Amino acid sequence: MARLRRLPLGALLVLAPLLAPQGVMARSAQPQASRSAAASQAGEPVLRVLVVQGQEARLRPALSAAGLRLRDAQGRVLEEFSGQVVLQASVDGTWLRLVHADGSDSEQWQLRQVWLEALAGAEEPDPGVWVGQRRYRGRLQLIPQGGQLQAVNHVPLETYLPSVVGSEMPASWPQEALQAQAVAARTYALKARKRSAVFDVQATTASQVYKGVEAETPSTHAAVQATQGLVLTYNNALIDAVFHSSSGGSTESSGDLWPRQLPYLVSVPDFDQASPVRDWRLPLDRSRLQRAFPELGGALGIDVVSTTPTGRVRQARVVGPSGQLSLTGAQLRSRLGLKSTWVRFELVPTADATAPVPAAGAVPLLTGSQSDAATAVVPVLPPPPLPAFSLPVPSTKTPEVVQLVAVGRGFGHGVGMSQWGALAMAQRGESFSSILKHYYRGTALQPYSELARTTAAGRGWTNDSPRSLAVSP
């Protein structure tokens, strides 16, 4: 490990603002040889993705990189390493602490934040930096936030998308399906940008899945390139391009699940018959019910009180030994770990409760676009009469002879594009634009560069509102 350049030790304690001015970082903190710099100069949007949030992170440059560069919040170079170096980042109060992970050097840095970038190698202009088990192109910003370390990947939009497409959809699927996913992901990411926040999106199903460089493939790069810059709009504004794995036969209108009905998110027929989770069963034994409803001492029965027009649970009542709860479908799904809210409950003998679930085969299940927001606190009321179909009062002296079973359809919230439906449409020869227009009704495809020149770009209803679309994957 050879140092190429460093500042005096006294300059390494930097009392910097929490966020660097965007103009300063755009000019001084991007490697000139990297695509990040080229994208910035070309006006391509740069996305800020939260890739790690925790107590610590292990960092190293890609093997194809020439080394690693550290900068402070003002863009000043703290140090450059040639070859491979492994650093350990952690939080000490409101400070960020950075040390050599192998203990070979006693030198350490203590800062308000730090920026890392891989030095361009002979093979790749932007080889990326490893953060734990994932490698990310662009630059990494490390900051302490609320007692935890946040690693935020600043990456050009079109560099980000091949990984998202490969993380959200099997790369072996037809190009038209991958291209539909690329446009939906691009639109979703641009709509999610928030100037006032530290990051725009997360790398998980809380936003859309982003597994870094290793999720990129030639087919996902081709899909992004074929649709470069294209976004979905409604009335000349970006739409909220939510998507999910499999609807179970019919997608849901946004207003039937969430607070707002958007004109382009209406219920349409789905074509997800080949989905391994179009139909599923989940046995709910007493221990699972006790973990799901501890304030009730478990659950003796679950009543579906109301449903949406397609059949998804809107409201449910859970009756336990010590009371009852009224829950939304999203809350019930979160507590029980259900694949969707399109579910009914049956009481069956335990011998039948574990009837086989349709096998997933070798095709991976898809994750969808966003996470569940079923966290509201609900009151515990005295127990009412039990539902018509309910478990007997639990006893430790007798074996469990009957069991509640959740019988459901689909995987995800069911709003917007169904990924398995997109596959079926692509397999029968539909274009990516036809797929998108089926699931996002009344929308138009247009280049983002055109949209960005109008005052309507990025305005209107956005994900900045307090989870107005409180969605689950």
Image: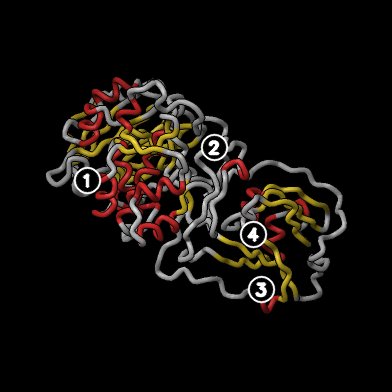
**Which label is found at residue 343?**
4
Q: Give the secondary structure at mark 2.
A: loop
Q: Name the residue tied to disc 2.
A: 262
| Amino acid at pointer 2 | Leu
Q: Earlier in the sequence, mark 1 or mark 2?
A: 1
What is the quadrant of the N terminus in the image? top left
Element class at badge 4: strand
Single out the residue that lies furthest toward the left.
122
x, y percent for residue 22 = 33, 22
- Please give the name of the residue rendered at 70% of the width and 63% of the height, measured from the top-left corner: 345
- Model colouring: secondary structure
* Mark in front: 4 vs 1: 4
**Disc 2 or disc 3, which is closer to the eye?**
2
Residue mark closest to the camera, 1 vs 2: 2
Whether residues under marks 1 and 2 lie with C-beta atoms below 8 angstroms apart, the answer is no
Residue 84: numbered disc:
1
**Distance of mark 1 from mark 3, alpha carbons?**
54 Å
Question: In front: mark 4 or mark 3?
Answer: 4
Residue 3 placed where, x, y %?
18, 36
Where in the figure is residue 284, as x and y percent of width and height? Answer: 67, 65
Label at residue 353: 3
Q: Which callout, 2 or 4, points at the residue further toward the start of the chain?
A: 2
Q: Earlier in the sequence, mark 4 or mark 1?
A: 1
Residue 205 seen in the figure = no
Q: Nearer the viewer, residue 110 or 465?
A: 465
- Residue at x-position 79% and y-position 67%: 391
Label 1: how many residues lie within 10 Å, few (<14), some (14-19) or many (20+)? some
